Image (cartoon, rainbow, N blue to C red):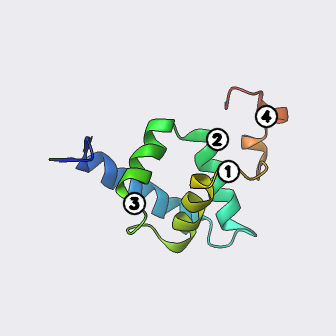
Amino acid sequence: MSEGGYHVDTTAKLVRMVNQIEANLRHDKDPVATMADHIHAFWTEAMKKQVFDHGTHELGPVGAAAFAQLARGIHPAPQVAATDPKDHGADGG
């Protein structure tokens, strides 16, 4: 089965990943910014596009808000050393 040209199982895995990240950030000071930072820094454009194309209806509130920020072109400052280019270089890892 396909959904928007993508395999549904892959979309389901990405949705599950977003929701798992959200669960891990439940005690974070700013979970939306942290998630948006993580997605921006570590997800490929294809992964992000797949979630954008699918929609955020299956994401939790933090994931939906993070993707809404990214859709508006809002990229938060690095939230952790792992996503800060001065700590790891500009290549994302």
- Disc 1 to disc 4, C-alpha distance: 12 Å
Q: Which mark is residue 85?
A: 4
State the residue position of label 3.
55
- Disc 2 to disc 4, C-alpha distance: 10 Å
Q: Closer to the N terminus: mark 4 or mark 3? A: 3
Identified by mark 4, the residue type is Pro
State the residue position of label 2.
41
Query: Quick one: label 4, few (<14), some, or many (20+) residues within 10 Å?
Result: some
Query: Which is closer to the viewer, label 3 or label 1?
Result: 3
**Residue at (25, 41) in percent of width and height:** 5
Identified by mark 1, the residue type is Asp
**In contact (CB < 8 Å): disc 1 and disc 4:** no
- Disc 3 to disc 1, C-alpha distance: 19 Å
Q: Closer to the N terminus: mark 2 or mark 4? A: 2
The secondary structure type at the circle numbered 2 is: helix
**In contact (CB < 8 Å): disc 3 and disc 1:** no
**In contact (CB < 8 Å): disc 2 and disc 1:** yes
The secondary structure type at the circle numbered 1 is: helix
Q: Which mark is residue 37?
A: 1
Asked if residue 67 is positioned above or below residue 39 in the image, the reply reads below
Query: Which is closer to the viewer, label 4 or label 3?
Result: 3
The secondary structure type at the circle numbered 4 is: helix
The secondary structure type at the circle numbered 3 is: loop
**Residue at (44, 67) in percent of width and height:** 59
